[in-house]
Image: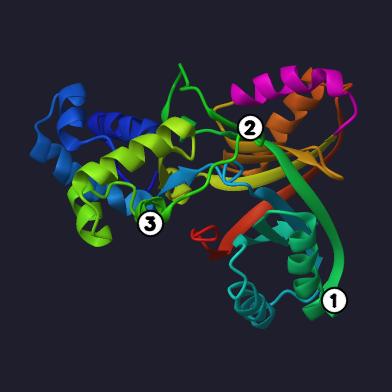
Amino acid sequence: MKFKLDKKDIEILKILDRNFRTQFSAIGKKVGLDKNSVRLRFQKLKEIMSHNTAGINNKILGYALVKIFYSIDYFDKNIEEKIIDKLKKHPKVAYAARHYGHYNLEIALFVKDFDELDSQISIFNEKFSKIISKKEIEIVVKEFFFGNNFLYDNNLPAGNVVEYKGEKKVLDKADHKIISILVDNPRESIIEISNKTYLSPKTVISHMKAMEKSGIISGYFMMLDYSKFGLNPFKILIQTSNLAENDKFEKHLSSIKNVKHFSRLLGFWDYEIDMLYGSILELQEQIEILKHLFPNHIKKIEIVSHGKRILTNRRYFL
């Protein structure tokens, strides 16, 4: 580990991992430190945080999450810059990531209908058709989000399951203003949000509680720089052959501390799993365990090494 952490630091991170808006005074009571000591440690811990955000359940807002995995020929820095320039003009694109493996580009976007999906994808495909050798379109059916479970030795906290079904909600102007701040800084105080939105503190509190209760805001999350912990992000795509084992398979995935996130998909692939390991060998060992436990379920596996996010747009719905 490149970054030195003591037991108090780890305990603070665990608390922030469950709710990034937890106040310093509340953290101090749990770890046996005064508020100012927690504040000082938090400033140090910010060095190992990549970014932090409020989780938004986009399905409740009427959006479907779609991911397109591309195999791009001649993927150099010049092509990357052209892709970024093209995608940043499309507000429905949530992010784009460069990978290494069979698929070297992933684009995630939120759409409200298939006409919009066709329009968004066609624009990009037409622009880069000469260098696209393969693409797979996947619709996300169900998502499982986990915190930074590698911080725990045992007793992993429950994950956050997002199923894309249920009653749709509509954001009003106040909701839009509040969320636009929280997605960039989930620890922003009520007073600061009030000052920036010109809404009263009472109104801010009321709208935040309503969005949390309805599930529009699914939580406040801390994103760590995994390299500081000697970990590398990997993505595996799995095609299955036995739907009856899905629940059992998902329960097992949820018990693996190295799993950061996984999705059930509708498309060529049935699962997308984001995992954190120190090396590709450790990941391969985990894959062999999965194959052994689910020999009649796992049909095909593709390993993708995550390179970097080349574009992030946290305001795609605002």
Q: Nearer the viewer, residue 96 or 37?
A: 96
CA gap, disc 1 and disc 3: 34 Å
Q: Nearer the viewer, mark 3 or mark 2?
A: 2
Within the image, what quadrant is residue 31 found in?
top left
Q: Position of residue 160 (x, y in %)?
A: 53, 30
Q: Amino acid at mark 2?
A: Gly
Which residue lies at the image location 22% right of the left edge and 53% below the top edge?
A: 194
Query: Which residue corresponds to mark 2?
Result: 166
The circle drawn on residue 170 is none
Q: Are marks 1 and 3 in contact (CB under 8 Å)?
A: no
Amino acid at the residue labelled 1: Ser
- 41 vs 154, left or right, is left
Check disc 1: other Cα within 10 Å, few if <14, some if 14-19, many if 20+.
Answer: few
Quarter of the rendering containing residue 254: top right
Residue corresponding to mark 1: 129
- In front of the other: label 1 or label 2? 2
87 up-or-down from 69: above or below: below
Confirm whether the magenta stretch covers residue 251: yes
Picture coordinates of residue 248 (x, y %)?
A: 73, 17
* Sooner in the amino-acid sequence: mark 1 or mark 2: 1
Q: Label 3 to label 2, Cα distance in Å?
A: 27 Å
Of residues 56 and 199, the one nearer the viewer is: 199
The alpha-carbon separation of the residues under discs 1 and 2 comes to 37 Å
Task: Assess disc 3: are there few (<14), some (14-19) or many (≥20) residues with their C-alpha within 10 Å of its C-alpha.
Answer: some
Magenta residue check for 175? no
Determine whether, in the image, residue 41 is placed left or right of residue 291. Answer: left
SS at circle 2: loop
Q: Which residue is mark 3?
A: 184
Mark 1 in CB contact with mark 2 (< 8 angstroms): no
Give the residues in magenta. 240-255
Of residue 131 and residue 282, the one placed in the foreground of this image is 131
